[in-house]
Amino acid sequence: MSEITLDVWLYGPLARYGGNAQEKVFANLHPCLPAGTTVRDLLNHLGLPAEERGITFINGDLSAMPGMQPDLDHELRDGDRIALFHLRSMWPFQYRHGAAAIPEMAEALQQSRDMGLHHAYDPGKAPDGEGTI
Amino acid sequence: MWFVRIDMTNRSAAVSEAPAKYKYLAGRAMTSTLVADEVPPLCHPLGPSNKLVFAGGITTGTPAPTSARISVGAKSPLTGGIKEANAGSSWAADLAVMQIQALVVEGQPAEKGKYWGAYITYDGKPKVEFFDATEYTGKVLPEVFPKIYEKFGDKISICSIGTAGEFGYGNSGVVFNDLAKRPTRYSGRGGLGAVMGSKGLKFLVLNRENAPGVHIEDKALFDEGRKKMIDALRTHAITKPKGALNSYGTAVLINIMNEAGGLPTRNFSSGRFEGAPKIAGEAIFETNKERLGKELYNHACSPGCIIQCSNTYHKVDGSEHTSCIEYESDWSLGANCGIDNLDHVAELNALCNAYGLDTIETGVTIGVAMEAGVIPFGDGEAAIKLVHEIGKGTPQGRILGAGTETAGKVYGVKRVPTVKGQAMPAYEPRAVKGIGITYATSTMGADHTAGYTIAPEILGVMGKQDPLSNEGKAALSRAFQATTAFIDSCGHCLFIAFAILDIASGYQGMIDECNGVLGTKWTADDILKYGAEVLKKERAFNEAAGIPKEADRMPEFMLKEPLPPHNQVFDIPESALDSVYGEL
Ligand code: SF4
């Protein structure tokens, strides 16, 4: 079975999932994973619970926001750059609208209340003590 | 309420009852209306006919949270159009509790090279005295501020300009004190410092002793609104204590924008900077922790702010280096110049504050100079030298101090990221097209604070349009700009918008607070209308000043050069740009 190599960026408190438990600024790793790996598989591989990550990018395209994770089944390709942010990172709507998103995310935003014009999507499900955006 | 007019032609002051027709005007609505009513649109911005207007917002000086904002307005030497730039400072609250609705500085002394300060106290009504301030000129601001506190005591607030304003630069801000008495809070954009300097005015010092406080028409309604606002700010993830802004400040956006491919890098030639993680908010937080041995959360720039987004950055020995490294400053002095050394970025930021420069305009101008080969991209030490030249007024410094557009012309650069003469902030419009529309059409020139949104109701304004279509984006930008014009008038810091967009009761809280102070019965619709009225006045001023709708355009290179990594150009059609104000 063929493998793919990913370019994974973990920011802020998520950096600790990059191998060094003390790291809190950022981590950049290049895991080799089986072809067909999805975002969910990658998170499992990193031991990173999906609800601990917020804003996520795949090759510069927005793929997830806190409380909105339509990318879990998105299949990753060789060389993809995936960036994962912790829940305290923010990207306010006014600085985001018109930016690129993966098709699953674009669809999810269209379906969401007020077509994505928010910073928080599912505040009810936010883990306590951490922020959602 | 009072109008205080200071005529610098003969250093006289007139204090009069505020005109009834301006009753509900505050903040940006007040400054823009006065500029529109009293400044000849074709006057020279640094001549005697221009006026510099200061006004706090509707809730400024009250116990409303995060409300100590001051608007400064004039005809801008940078854009040639109308300008409003606001800042958070105790100075704003002090002006408001003295019940000064507008402070207008006009005229011009015949004598050159002499500078004055105005000391404003309250004794039954505001009183203005003048003092010779020439001895404080030609110096860096951190040296000057303590001397003014020494002269007038600890209880004062200070508004001033640096050498940038004295030299008449298009890049020069008006500075206010922060809570630690540092000269760090800027109405930075558009060269307002030069307008103040052109009037021979170096300081406006306020002493609030014996001031009566802000009159609140309906105290119960105000308190209700205030409580709703506090609840919203305390619960929202972006604005709550130890939330996004309080932990990492606005600089947390560096990594986000970098991953989105929208962090303008090396003079807007790429949307991604490989050094971004080294200068981002997370790095500032961890560097402070390492150097101080403890976690440092952000502080309030002004009294009564409960969001507290303002950071300080510390040197290796733990001493303070600068406050505050905002996202915009971090980006302009860092990524946009290819500089990935946080200590260099901090030094550049400190120098901008010391000389009275706008950090955005400074970083973007240096980026253009780097493009021209004056110094190499990434060379932090050379950039520091250039900022010293600007601050000291050497011949080259004067060229750079004139701003990005002028520097681009002098050095023959074609990639000059400006709209209406003002340098573009830190969101690449080829990657984030929605904000590009606002950059292009704002009455202020390229401005990232011109397009905020606060409530889902706003969607009603744009009807059923798809927000991702060009028409939808234009309609959104129009609604955002109107909303922002209101927030800029209500006294709150724009950052309340993050919370009250998601929390409807917070939005109602803002309306209740304003109705409580003024005794009005405004609804959500009235607020948008208020904002739209402000925009119409600003737009009309700009048109009369010779800025046509054809100025609502992106620089040509953004239409032609695809921006990596998304390899997109700015492709919003001109008709969509024209519809933003065409349909206001
Ligand atoms: S949110 Fe930040 S910029 Fe706004 S008033 Fe508070 S400290 Fe100042």
Image (cartoon, coloured by chain):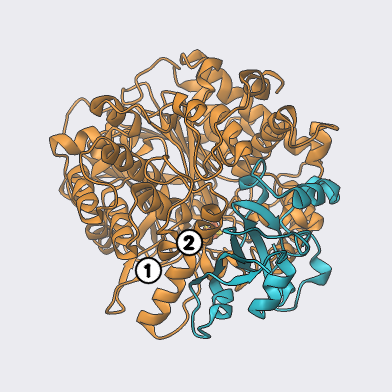
Nearest the eye: B273 or B103: B273
Name the chain letter of the residue that bears numbered label 2: B
Residue placed furthest toward the front: A1
> Alpha-carbon neighbours of circle 2 within 10 Å: few (<14), some, or many (≥20)?
many
Q: Disc 1 and disc 2: Cα gap in Å?
A: 14 Å
Q: Quadrant of residue B33?
A: top right
**Residue B522 appearing in the image:** no
Q: Which residue is mark 2?
A: B301
Name the chain letter of the residue that bears numbered label 1: B
Q: What amino acid type should be assigned to the residue bearing mark 2?
A: Cys
Residue drawn at x 66%, y 77% as measured from the top left: A45
Residue B372 at x, y percent in the picture: 25, 34
Q: Is residue B323 left or right of residue B461?
A: left
Nearest the eye: B144 or B573: B573
Establish whether ligand 1 lies closer than 8 Å to the Cβ of label 2. Answer: yes
Residue A24 at x, y percent in the picture: 50, 77
Nearest the eye: B476 or B305: B476
Secondary structure beneath disc 2? loop
Chain B as rendered: colour: orange
Looking at the image, is mark 1 or mark 2 nearer the viewer?
Answer: 1
Chain A as rendered: colour: cyan
Q: Is residue B254 left or right of residue B494?
A: left
Residue drawn at x 84%, y 36% as measured from the top left: B460
Of the two numbered discs 1 and 2 on the same chain, state the one appearing first in sequence: 2
Residue A129 at x, y percent in the picture: 70, 78
User: In which quadrant will I find the N terminus of chain B?
Assistant: top right
B515 over A32 or under it: above or below? above
